[in-house]
Image: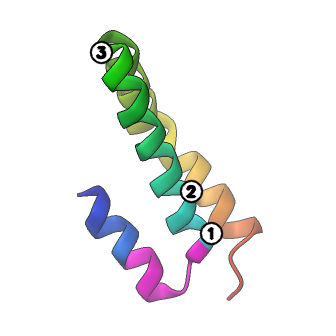
C-alpha cells in the first residue's frame, strides 16, 4: 500500500509528500530492524497520525 501511495503522489506531482512518506516508512523499517517493539509502535503512530503530516506537507510544500 505504501509504495502505491508514494507512486500516486509522484503521479500527481506531490514530490515532497512522496519523499516524506518514503522517509517516514524507511525510518520505521530501519528502527524496526533494531528494535521490533519500537518499530511496531512507530507503525501504529504512522497509521493513525501519518495522514495529518502528509496533508500538511502537501498543503504547504508541494506546488500545484
The answer to whether marks 2 and 1 mark residues whose Cβ atoms lie closer than 8 Å is yes
**For the residues bearing labels 1 and 3, Cβ distance under 8 angstroms:** no
Question: Badge 3 is on which residue?
Answer: 36
Number of residues whose C-alpha sits closer than 10 Å to that of mark 3, classed few (under 14), some (14–19) or many (20 or more): some
Residue 36 is left or right of residue 13, and the answer is: left
Determine whether 9 is above or below 42 in the image: below
- Residue at image mark 2: 20
Q: In which image quadrant can residue 41 be found?
A: top left
> Crowding near pointer 2: few (<14 within 10 Å), some, many (20+)?
some
Measured in 3D between alpha carbons, the distance from the residue under mark 1 to the one under mark 3, in whole angstroms, is 28 Å
Label 3, label 2: how many angstroms apart (C-alpha)? 22 Å
Q: Residue at x 29, y 63 (%)?
A: 3
Q: In the figure, residue 13 lies in which quadrant?
A: bottom right
Question: Residue, x 74% and y 70% (percent of image)?
Answer: 61
Q: How many marks?
A: 3
Is 30 inside the magenta-drawn segment?
no
Image position of 13 with respect to 24: above or below: below
On the image, the x and y values in percent for residue 2 come to: 30, 57
Pick whichever of labels 3 and 2 is earlier in the sequence: 2
Q: Which numbered disc, 3 or 2, marks the residue closer to the eye?
A: 3
Q: Seen from this angle, which residue lies furthest right?
A: 60
Q: In the image as oriented, which residue stretches furthest toward the front?
A: 34
Main SS, magenta region, reads: helix
Q: Which of 22/56 is in front?
A: 22
**Image mark for residue 16:** 1
Label 1 secondary element: helix
Magenta span covers which residues? 8-15
Q: Residue at x 36, y 13 (%)?
A: 35
Amino acid at each position: 500500500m505504501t509504495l502505491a501511495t508514494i507512486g500516486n503522489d509522484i503521479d500527481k506531482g506531490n514530490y515532497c509528500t512522496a519523499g516524506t512518506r518514503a522517509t517516514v516508512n524507511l525510518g520505521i523499517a530501519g528502527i524496526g530492524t533494531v528494535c521490533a517493539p519500537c518499530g511496531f509502535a512507530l507503525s501504529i503512530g504512522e497509521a493513525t497520525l501519518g495522514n495529518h503530516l502528509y496533508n500538511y506537507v502537501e498543503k504547504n510544500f508541494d506546488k500545484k
